[in-house]
Amino acid sequence: MTFDLAFAWSILPDLLAGLGVTLEVVVAGFCGAVAIGGAMALLRQCSVGALRVLSKAYIAFFRQTPLLVQLYFLFFALPLSGLTLPAIATGVLGLGLYYGAYIAEAFRGAINDVPAGQWEAARALDFGPLALWRRIILPQAMKPMVPVLGNYLIGMFKETPLLAVITIPELFQAAKQIAGVTYRYNEPYTLMALLFLAISLPTSFIFNYLEKKNRHG
Amino acid sequence: MDTEQLEFIARQLLKGIGVTLQITLLAALLALALAFIVALLRLSPFRPLSVGARVYIEFFRGTSALVQLFYLFFILPLLGITLSPMTTAVIGLGLNFSSFGAEIVRSALVNVGQGQRDALRALDFPAAAGLRRIILPQALPFMLPPLGSLLVELLKSTSLVSMITLSDLTFSGSTLITSLGHQTLIWSFVLVCYFFLSWPLVWLVRRYERRHTRHRGSRGAR
């Protein structure tokens, strides 16, 4: 088996187009996951018992079942109940719901790590709930969240090949299609792995740098 | 849906659960063994070994598990190495999860104070005995909870092997849908099965964490 450089070069534009779709889905999915994660973490702190249970059940369900099966469910089973979403929207929703559960737990951990004295001091100074969260708790909780969010962003990026099963034309789907048409697996899959590394390694370094910067000042 | 169909579904799903658990167990053993080896290599004072271990970790962590499985399944046969889907699944998932495991093991070993290591050296303790009798027992409480969580992730990731035609739980679900329909019901069954398969592991990890982590002075948010 040889690695044909000219062939690899010729398929690069198609793979890059797939990578573009992958990145779009990841960015949208990540924004959704952070929003869902934040909302679920706040519900976990809520004084209404039913909302706390709801948030716990959500987190347990999405963390204990595979993303692939969740995507199958969203894409194939939801339309039967009358809710048909385009493939890309399903992918974004799937990634957002799945990673939302993980981010909710990370947020919860970060919020719990804010020292008790900070809560008490803010209450003693008569901070309202909104000001307490916005000015005291969240700024302190967000600092340790940077590396965690970075890891989830990279994790989400690496999960995107699963989106091929719901026909999203992302990087993996593009490589699979090229392999299917040309019967050459080596070049598309190798290039795809290299493209994954080309995105995930620098992202990992950036978040490591941010983490170190946060730690030192 | 009649009772006969429900029985058929249950039988197929049980078969799938068996395969899923088998892959999880074998891949976990491989991942754990490799994780320890790679972590020790990463901590080695001999730089080429430590750099090699780092490259291994970054490579397997930086690329998708599914892509790695596809690579093993489609590219290796072109090099003359043909593996059965089960072996591919165990090796693929084992390699992928060993990279995450290696970092967990490494950070747990590093967490054991430098003083302990210095004391071992001062006492001229053999390295292997020191690791086995002094360092490892102290590092275990640090590594067990994240390794437990990793095992839950591994269990869920076995769903990927359905893409290389291995008849695990997910594959059984999609085969049942092809022959019977009932998308919503069968995917719901599959989701519930995964949920309850991972439940004991999650429960054990939580129990262990509660026992072994010291309560820090937080405001006690729920």
Image (cartoon, grey):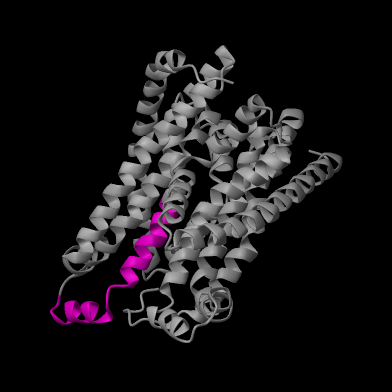
Residue furthest to the left in view is A125
Front residue of this view, candidates A203 and A9: A9
Residue appearing at x 83%, y 41% in the figure: B8
Magenta stretch: includes residue A107: yes
Q: Is residue A35 left or right of residue B186?
A: left
Q: How many tags in the picture? A: 0
Residue B159, can we see it? yes
In this rendering, position of residue A113 left or right of residue B103: left
Q: Residue at x 17, y 77 (%)?
A: A122
Rendered image quadrant of residue A73: top right
Tell me the quarter of the image containing the N terminus of chain B. top right
Q: Is residue B64 magenta?
A: no
Q: Nearer the viewer, residue A107 or B37?
A: B37
Q: Position of residue A117 (x, y in %)?
A: 23, 82
Q: Considering only vertical position in the picture, is A89 above or below A141?
A: above
Query: What segment is highlighted magenta in the picture?
Result: A100-126
Q: Is residue B55 above or below residue A133?
A: above
At 52% from the left edge and 57% from the top edge, which residue is drawn? B38
Q: Which residue corresponds to the image point at 25% horizontal and 53% vertical from the top-left?
A: A209
> Measured from the top left, where is residue B183 in percent x and y?
66, 35
B149 relative to B54 in the view: left or right: right
Q: Position of residue A190 (x, y in %)?
A: 49, 28
The one of A62 and B162 positioned closer to us in this rendering: B162
Location of the C terminus of chain B by quadrant is bottom left
Considering depth in this image, is A77 or A152 the residue closer to the camera? A152
Predominant SS along the magenta part: helix
